[in-house]
Image: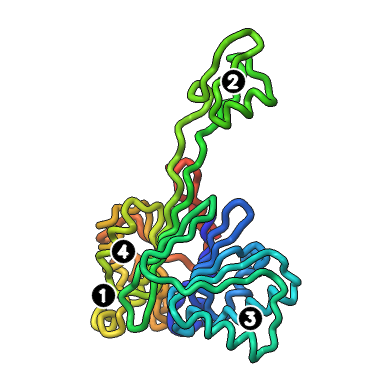
Amino acid sequence: MKVYFLGVGGGIPSQNRASPATAIYFRGKILLFDCGEGTQIQLKRSGLSPQRIIDIFISHLHGDHVLGLPGLLSTMAMLQRTKPLTIYGPPGIRSFIETNLELTHTQLEFDFAIKEVEKGTITHPNQYRVECLPALHNIPAFSYILRMTDIPGKFYVSKARRLGIPSGPLRKRLQQGHTITTAGGKRVKPSEVIGPIRKGPIIVYSGDTAPNPKLATKAKNATLLIHDATFSEGHKDKAKEFLHSTAAQAAQIASKAKVEQLALIHISPRYVSFETHEKEAREIFPNAFAPNDLDVLELNPSRKFLARSC
């Protein structure tokens, strides 16, 4: 699983930071969280196809989080997309999308659904579920908690070989959880050749929000918390006025939630670098970083190592 930070800026795009958009890539599929202006360009620069997006989650309707949607949908239409797509967002997202499609005369030939979410709304696909939580912002806004299903335990080929289990149907039955009998008459349980189930990753996306104690509860033990860090502590008053968070406040949420890693995003264009944000956050939560546009964070299945690459 990989996390693509397509845009890490906030408010307005700058020369070095695009508007908010984060893509979660797994098993050939993409979940997109927010879709700021220029998101489809960032997807292309990342080598990601919009055709692989299956769900889009919009945190709120401020322009920097949603204005990339009309262009992205138009591109999907022109690429003759056939796969279904669902967009989740706060009340008003349906009107925004349908009005743009109508006025631009965009015809979508694929199955397309818009769902206006409420507190506690959860999606239940086979491979993941997503819960939404009201954020603390100046318009209706949500945070999203993505919980991937558990990962099957590792199959140890060397152990199977020593027990006389050849490649083929017998190994497959073991992987399906069945006890088998070898050609030599030995009964083998799945636990003898398969490691323990690994907990699926949990990724929490805050959207724009003031520090929210409820988010700390929902993010408990998450693999990754992606949190609003619009301001540094030097502009803490601005964060309070506009219901955003500072990097230090994001770190406090991460610390309370005992997450594995914290990514600081939605940085105001007033800041030339991320150094101050990272310094302030790491004083509270050492495993914090501020990604650049197009950074990719790979979540290792072993859960023991998180690697950052560009």
Which residue, given by chain and number where applicable, does mark 2 sit on?
A: 160
Of labels 4 and 1, the one closer to you: 4
Which residue, given by chain and number where applicable, does mark 3 sit on?
A: 71
Would residue 293 be seen by someone viewing this image from the given angle? no
The x, y position of residue 220, in whole percent, is 31, 54
Report helix, strand or loop for mark 4: helix
Q: What number is the disc on residue 122? A: none
Q: Is there CB contact under 8 Å for labels 4 and 3?
A: no
Label 1 amino acid?
Answer: Glu
CA–CA distance in space, label 4 to label 1: 21 Å
Label 4 amino acid?
Answer: Leu
Would residue 146 be seen by someone viewing this image from the given angle? yes
Sequence order check: which comes first, mark 2 or mark 1?
A: 2
Of residues 210 and 104, the one nearer the viewer is: 104
Q: Is there CB contact under 8 Å for labels 4 and 2?
A: no
Lateral position of residue 76 relative to residue 129, left or right: right
CA–CA distance in space, label 3 to label 1: 36 Å
Picture residue at 60% right of the left edge, 63% below the top: 54
Task: Answer few, some or many: residues within 10 Å of disc 4's Cα (few below 14, many 20 plus, some between 14 and 19).
Answer: many
Task: Answer few, some or many: residues within 10 Å of disc 3's Cα (few below 14, many 20 plus, some between 14 and 19).
Answer: many
Label 2 amino acid?
Answer: Ala
Which residue, given by chain and number where applicable, does mark 4 sit on?
A: 215
CA–CA distance in space, label 4 to label 2: 44 Å
Position above or below: 278 against 179: below
Report helix, strand or loop for mark 1: helix
Which residue, given by chain and number where applicable, does mark 1 sit on?
A: 233
How many callouts does the rendering have? 4
The x, y position of residue 2, in whole percent, is 54, 55
